[in-house]
Image (cartoon, grey):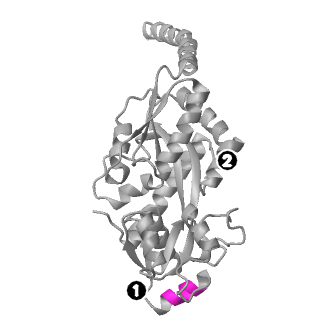
Amino acid sequence: MKTIYPRFTFVLAGLALLAPCGYAFAQSSAQAYPTGPVRIVVPFPAGGGVDTTGRLIGQKLAEALGKQFVIDNRPGANGMIGSEIVAKSPRDGHTLMVNGANFVTTPSLYSQVSYDPIKDFDPISLLTFAPNVLVVHPSLPAKSVKELVALAKSRPGQVNFAGSGSGSTPHLAAELFNTLANVKMVHVPYRGTGPAIVGLMSGEVSVMFMPTTNAVPLVKSGKLRALAVTSRARISALPALSTVAESGLDGYESSQWYGMLAPAGTPVEILNVLNSHVVKIMQTPDMKQRMTDGGSVAVGSTREAFASHLKAEFEKWARVIKQSGARVD
């Protein structure tokens, strides 16, 4: 015992001397970051909401940090290809990802997914969220959420709704509505938002949970009837329109959202640098206006808040998907 304790004390003393060096190294790494171009992987094609948001935040980060932030579109398999690339990338802060709400729903929709949205990524910040608007074709005899619920109950399996693909945010928003209202509206999948809107406008389907950007002009022109907005609070674009929850379905909330993540194990000092800049960027008047013009709301959150959001969304939609039986494969 007498020979062990002195050695143990010596080791502790050595570690104590090294600790400040480690702290200084971490600090210098964060101050030097980034040391070169940063790749932001977007797991979807150019031109969509995830891509547009990624390009905006990448441009602003490049201006703030003095290095290139390059968008790398890696579409395919409902975002799985790009997400897997990021999960397996070096943990040095030079490969990041901007992804959307389907990031946490995909594992429940597919039988095989190569990544874990909670364990394989470090959250940086929630960037923005965009609610849908519950709209109906003018021929449908329902002028409120309560009337739609009553109609769906009186015609089980006969009221149909458009979705921009199986497992899309509009599809799952309607499935959550089905679950909470205890009705069975039938999903009609289309190949994207555009074709789904055409189907609704033509009367091919009666109901859709439509992205705000698309819904607002159609509602204001009288071509569609809005019943409610899917977010927790009302939106400035349609301030008189109540939320689904206010209209009688307590606890209802469904929004598309976009966030920035890094591979799990990225140094916390680098994550903090990125979070600090992203939050400042998302709170600027310019970015807030850009998000509003695009039908969304600028956020910019703490890393901890985004982590909690990811976990809650993953668990919530896993339950909805299981109850609805929605599958993609």
Q: Which residue is mark 2?
A: 288
Question: Extreme front residue here?
Answer: 221
Compared with 264, 206 (above or below) is below
Q: Dividing the picture into quarters, in which one does residue 205 lie?
A: bottom left
Classify the position of the C terminus by image quarter: bottom left
Residue 14 seen anywhere in this rendered image of the structure: yes
Residue 309 in the image, given as x and y percentages of width and height: 55, 52
Instruction: Check disc 1 and give the amino acid type.
Output: Gly
Residues 278 and 20: in front is: 278
Q: Does 77 sit above or below residue 141?
A: above
Tell me the residue at 54%/79% (across/down): 136
x and y percentages locating residue 117 in the rendered image: 42, 47
- Secondary element at tag 2: helix
First to last magenta residue range? 147-152
User: What crowding class fits label 1: few (fewer than 14 Cα within 10 Å), some (14-19), or many (20 or more)?
Assistant: few
Tag on residue 157? 1
| Closer to us: 292 or 183 | 292
Identify the element where label 1 is drawn. loop
Residue beneath the point at 40% across and 72% down:
324
Position of residue 268 measured from the top left corner of the image (x, y, whole percent): 53, 30
Specify whether residue 244 is in view: no
Amino acid carrying mark 2 in the image: Lys
Q: Is residue 231 left or right of residue 178?
A: right
Residue 169 lies, in percent from the top left, at 46, 62
Residue 164 vs 52, above or below: the answer is below
The kind of secondary structure the magenta stretch mainly shows is helix
Decide: few, some or many residues near mark 2? Use Cα within 10 Å; few <14, some 14-19, many ≥20.
Answer: some
